[in-house]
Amino acid sequence: MLFLLAGAAELKGQVPVLIEDTEFQEVARAAIDSLYNRNPDAVHELMEPWSAKYPDHPLWLLWDAMDHWWMVLTDLYNHSQDELLFEKLEQANEAADRLLDESPGHPDAHIIQAVANGYIARHNANRERWVRSVRTGRTAYRAHIELEQAAPDLADNLFAKGLKEYYSAYLPEAYRVVRAVSWLLPDGDKAEGLRLLEYTSREAVFARPEANYFLGMILLNYEGEYEKAINLFQNLVDYYPNNSYYRRLLVRSLYRHNMSSAAKQEIEKALKYWAKNEFADELILKEELLYWQGRILNQTGQFEEAYQAFEDSYRIGLELPNRNKRRFHALSGYYAGLTAERNGDKTAARNFYRAVTQLDCEPEARERARVRMRNM
């Protein structure tokens, strides 16, 4: 009898494998969608029954870190939350380590480490800490390999494999310096990489939105499949309408590929939607979208309206963190000056040009502003 009680107590203390539980997978997919749609209350509501049942599971630390990731990613010029983000990701990673000590090969621990280290690597790249990014990226990839062994049927496994297949083939083709050391890279297959990313964009639990994003970026930047890429970005906006990062990505892509009319429509929809819902990141969205709106209005000869859009974007940048480094603050200032000059207001033009030359970003815009000032 005592043996049975001891065994029951041990079983009760075990951390379950949630990612192989079909019921949890459905809840996790819905929670991921809520996370990417910037609805943390919905995430908490979906996860609360599971976290109450298994309070010692390290997965909840990862969910908390992923929510903070989106807070940081929304405005990459704001560095104030970086340390807390890294701290939360490290906490999830260390908790997964402890779980592996207790239960070697635990699939949930491997996926936590793959995701946490992947985010650490990506954000170090955002901050141009390349050595740290590469080192942590290797750790993330090792976790993916271990996850493949522990849970071979999990669709999320194929996300990292798809990226590896594509970039191992693409990099030696695109960069001569990489070609010289291509023997160090694993064999790659671009078509297979794209196929795996397309599959995980539909079937993965955790990596589904990221697979859509990376597939779109590859098609846009490397494959020249602009229409397919923009369709993927449009799908991300449709799935996650509250996500300003995807809204800005879509508008940027439309404008850069000569689809100004569609970009104009998306700008107007996004600005109305954010004003109606009063989202906390409204100024961040408006800073960039008003810049693109100004560029479109300039193209159609609406110079007074274009000037107003550029000026509004520039003024918003004054209210946001780290304005000396903000790309669209600098660009809006330069184009506000250019449009003011075009409209005959040389005083305003000179003021904007002078302000841009004092910023610490966009060197081309700064140099052009200096030239315009000299010419005036």
Image (spheres, rainbow, N blue to C red):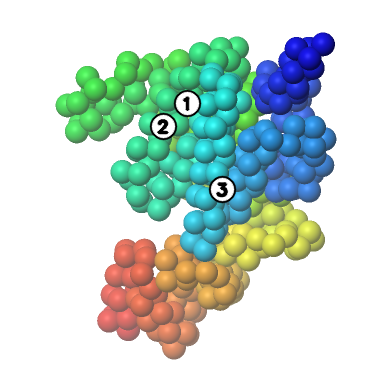
What residue is shown at x 60% (from left), y 12% (from top)?
153
- Quadrant of residue 309 in the image? bottom right
Viewer-side residue, 191 vs 129: 129
| Residue 50 at x, y percent in the picture | 78, 33
- Quadrant of residue 111 in the image? top right
Q: Is mark 3 on a helix, strand or loop?
A: helix
Identify the residue under disc 1: 143
Query: Distance between the Cα atoms at labels 2 and 3?
Result: 17 Å
How crowded pointer 1 is (Cα within 10 Å; few <14, some 14-19, many 20+) is rated as: many
User: Which amino acid lies under the numbered mark 1 shown in the image of this protein?
Assistant: Ala
| Residue 31 at x, y percent in the picture | 73, 36
Residue 213 seen by the camera: no
Q: Is mark 1 on a helix, strand or loop?
A: helix
Q: Are marks 1 and 2 in contact (CB under 8 Å)?
A: yes
Residue 139 is tagged as: 2
User: Which amino acid lies under the numbered mark 2 shown in the image of this protein?
Assistant: Thr
